Image (cartoon, helix red, strand yellow):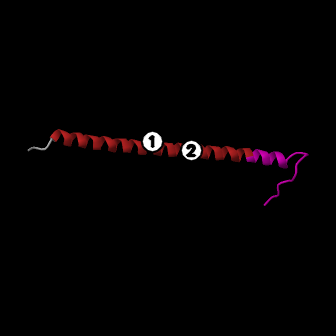
Amino acid sequence: MCPDLGAVSRAEGLHRASEEVIGLLKKVALVALAAGAFVAVRKRSAGKAEGADLWREATSGPDAVSTPTAR
């Protein structure tokens, strides 16, 4: 009796399709990771700028709590 070649080609096709889906999911995960890192860096940069403004406000003017020293 001859093997069912149609079943073999369908199985190969499903295997290739699953490999393509896995590859696509890996790419999506990589893009999501890069986007998350980008957002984290932007938030951190914004926080540093805000902190510098607060420091400038606290250390300048007549109501300054302290003055920066030269190092």
In depth, the one of 39 and 53 nearer the eye is 39
- Tell me which label, 2 or 1, sits earlier in the chain: 1
Q: Residues within 10 Å of mark 1 (few under 14, many from 20)?
A: few
Q: Is residue 26 left or right of residue 34?
A: left
Residue occupying image coordinates x 25% and y 40% = 13
Q: Is residue 9 left or right of residue 16?
A: left
Residue occupying image coordinates x 20% and y 43% = 8
The circle drawn on residue 28 is: 1
Residue occupying image coordinates x 37% and y 44% = 23
Q: Which residue is mark 2?
A: 38
Report the magenta residues as a range: 51-71
| Image quarter (top left, top right, bottom left or bottom right) of the C terminus | bottom right
- Where is 69 relative to 31, above or below? below
Q: Secondary structure at mark 1?
A: helix
Identity, as a three-letter code, of the amino acid under mark 2: Phe
In depth, the one of 13 and 38 nearer the eye is 13
Magenta highlight on residue 12: no
Residue occupying image coordinates x 23% and y 39% = 10
Nearer the observer: mark 2 or 1; the answer is: 1
